[in-house]
Amino acid sequence: MLTREWGGRKLGLGSKRWRQLNSQGMVEWRSILWVILAYTLITVVVTYPVAFRLRSALAGAPDQDALQHLWISWWTEKALLDLGTSPAQASYLYYPDGTYHPMLWVTPYPQVVALPLQLLFGQVVAYNLHLLLSFVLTGLTTYLLCYYLTRNKSASFIGGLVFAFFPNRLSHATAHLAQVVTYFFPLYALYLIKLLCCHTPSPKVGGGPGWVPERGGWREGRGGGWRNAWLCGILLALSMLVNIVHVAYFILPFTALLILYRIAVGKLREGEKGSLPSKRVKLGRLQIAPAGFAIQRPGGGLQIRREQECGRAKLTGSPLHIVAAFAFAAMLTAPFLLPFAWRSLSGQLSYLHMAGTVDYSADLSGFFTPALSHPVWGRWPSFRTWAAAVIGRGNTLESTVYLGVVALLLAGWGARRRWREARFWFILGLVALLLSLGPVLKIGGLQTSLPLPYALLQRLPFYKWGRIPGRANETIVLPLAVLASLGIASLLEPLRRLRKPSQGWLITVLSVLILFDCVVAWPFPAMEASVPGFYQRMAQEPGDFAVLDLPQWPIWLREASNRAMYYQTVHQHKIVGGYVWRLPEGLEGGMKALQELVLPPVTEDMIPRSSPEEALQALNRYHIRYVILHKEVWTAEEDAETLAALGRLLGEPFYDDQRLAAFLVPEIEIGGKEEGLLALSYGWYQVEDADGHPARWLKDEGILYVHRLTKGRYRLRFAAYPFREPRHLQVTVNGQAVADFEVANWQEFVTPSFTLAKGQNDIVFRVAEGCEVPAEVEAGSKDRRCLSVLFQRIELLAADGDSG
């Protein structure tokens, strides 16, 4: 039976005292149900039409990252239940190599919690439901935090509304599910506060939970400290397992700052002297306690006692409880985070350290600029011009950091009227704001040279694994929500003599204003979830074969890979390429080589290009049965050229619509030796003629990708010519130095033999002296390229076991 302690006695559910407390608002399950219903209705309206198209549409911007998060949930189910392996073993992506991708399993909560929904309703419905529930649950948990701090239901409802529907969160809801699964954060904050501070609720007039009765009020019974410690540890672990960026941008700043604040304020309060005023006062119907004091009501009279503030407060949990909470969280997360940390420290996750931190930082003006796609303000040309300069220059999902005028006004009022309670939250919001600005200050879309603290933080673990300081916006808005609830509580104090409907109308009007202020797009973006029928038929085909989706290159054309991964959840066969979180090292060459196998960029090049017969043999050798062109990713002209080229190689498509064209690879007999697939990285200029042969200039460094299905010994032969003066050319294979040549004139070179491994091999050409711009060193030249060495006739020669 459910019980609760009151004054040392346990109360059973349904007992007389339980009903009395419930009537006073201390255990108000009916209020919670009404709050859930209200947030649910708001979610349905804000995300319209998602709730009405749970099965036929997927919430999110078409062809964007929402498809990646859907794929992650599908792959977790596939790996755990069908293959019996870790989801980090991404064997169904990046065919034929596959990869170990630790980001797929380091934070497994969103996909694991979705498993029951997936098994019952399928991936699309499960994704939509989890997204919608995240709004409701985030509002509810923020409501509970604010109610613990204010003991005012109306104010707490506004606080939950602010944090559940703030613009940055709504923006990420169109693409990044893990970024909106934030419903554990307010609960973690609540229980950490309970561990560190004994909170005395704000005075509330007229009885109810705002009063602190003589018998001790609603206090923790025996064992309460340990219960809070275990709950705090569980909530901390769950928060850490949602998304690793939340650790950097919410958990670490909040936890560190609250502990430091507790220590600092505690030391300041140690020196305070003075007795507590004990005289009884009559304040009339509207009773107000001096700042720092709370009202007691022993035996019907009024008495003022000093409010216990976080810092001087009695600890509900000893230091042992606090250490136990963190240790318990560490134990729960260690199986996921430790392997990730080990790989990072050993240098295996360098691909996570990508550029773009400044682009993904918040613009200071962005905090006061509504979303570019706002359904009303976005229609004004002058606003769109300004917002495009502030938000549109970077990634709009990350750059939408608007805080909302209504929320800011309420928060400012709360900070002014209840500074003692607001002080920590105000400091936390400012620290998070500074963190979100990134390594250098940006104002009005312009980057300044003023360095900020994040320039140092980005070298630390968790911060160096991400490049998105703007996501600290969540750590700004949670304090904003608490401050707004304090502001509402202060506003409602003079209205207590009014009837409840008057307060209800005020809360309704404020809710509408906040939602209008924060909306990012309406109707909410959603993409069709329908799948061409041949994918279902493909799922029934026997055999282990793969699908080549185009385009694979350039790698930033994510729409094609996102679609391919979504369709893979239906056909369930391996695909070439893919993209989740980041592209692991050693895979891009194979993706580019397989694309150029069917779509060679030029007919003649300095490297061998496959004939149609050789291309068909290679496709069969790689067990690629289908080639799919995803349209409207390239230009219409490029799509037409690609369709024609694929038609000449593979015949007419067996399926063709506005979105894609599907080709079946003819089965032919495989003969001869494997020659490997070759492709070039960036760093090489376009093909040009040199003495009747195709040639390419090298900038200062370039890679020749060689993808093989088997291991072999080879030598490399090529011709080279220096720009203006002799240059030293270094050749490495998979990080191992192979040769160092001096290129003085047109000359043919042959390297010693080396081993090419199965999978992708990187042959790197590096010029020690670098490159020069002809227009800067030659009179009359207008060539602005940076040139070092000109290459011709690059060939791989079988070494036949010779060491070279």
Image (cartoon, rainbow, N blue to C red):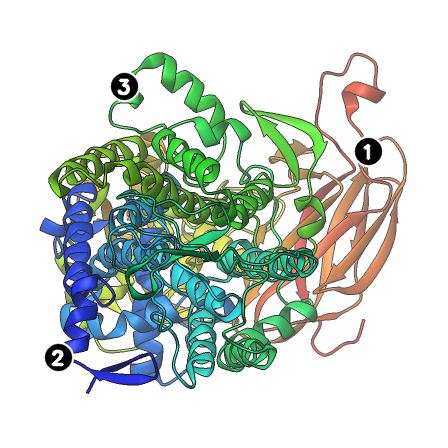
Q: Which residue is mark 1?
A: 723
In the image, farthest residue toward the left:
52
Question: Residue 252 falls in which quadrant of the image?
Answer: bottom right
Q: Amino acid at mark 1?
A: Phe
Q: Nearer the viewer, residue 125 or 730?
A: 125
Question: Residue 142 falls in which quadrant of the image?
Answer: bottom left
The quadrant the C terminus occupies is: bottom right
Q: Is residue 628 above or below residue 315?
A: above
CA–CA distance between discs 1 and 2? Answer: 90 Å
The quadrant the N terminus occupies is: bottom left
Sequence-wise, which precedes: disc 1 or disc 2?
Answer: 2
Q: Which residue is mark 2?
A: 14
Q: Residues within 10 Å of mark 2 (few under 14, many from 20)?
A: few
Q: Say what secondary structure mark 2 lies in.
A: loop
Query: Which residue is at a point 68% across and 61% down the rendered structure image?
Result: 270
Q: Is residue 367 above or below residue 524?
A: above
Taking the image as shown, residue 494 lies to the left or right of residue 550, namely left
Q: Amino acid at mark 3?
A: Arg
Q: Say what secondary structure mark 3 lies in.
A: helix
Q: Nearer the viewer, residue 474 or 738?
A: 474
Question: Residue 480, image x and y in percent?
Answer: 43, 43
Question: Residue 310, image x and y in percent?
Answer: 54, 59
Q: Nearer the viewer, residue 652 or 392?
A: 392
Taking the image as shown, residue 2 lies to the left or right of residue 355, namely left
Q: Amino acid at mark 2?
A: Gly
Q: Are marks 3 and 1 in contact (CB under 8 Å)?
A: no
Q: Which residue is mark 3?
A: 379
Question: Residue 520, image x and y in percent?
Answer: 30, 35
Q: Say what secondary structure mark 1 lies in.
A: loop
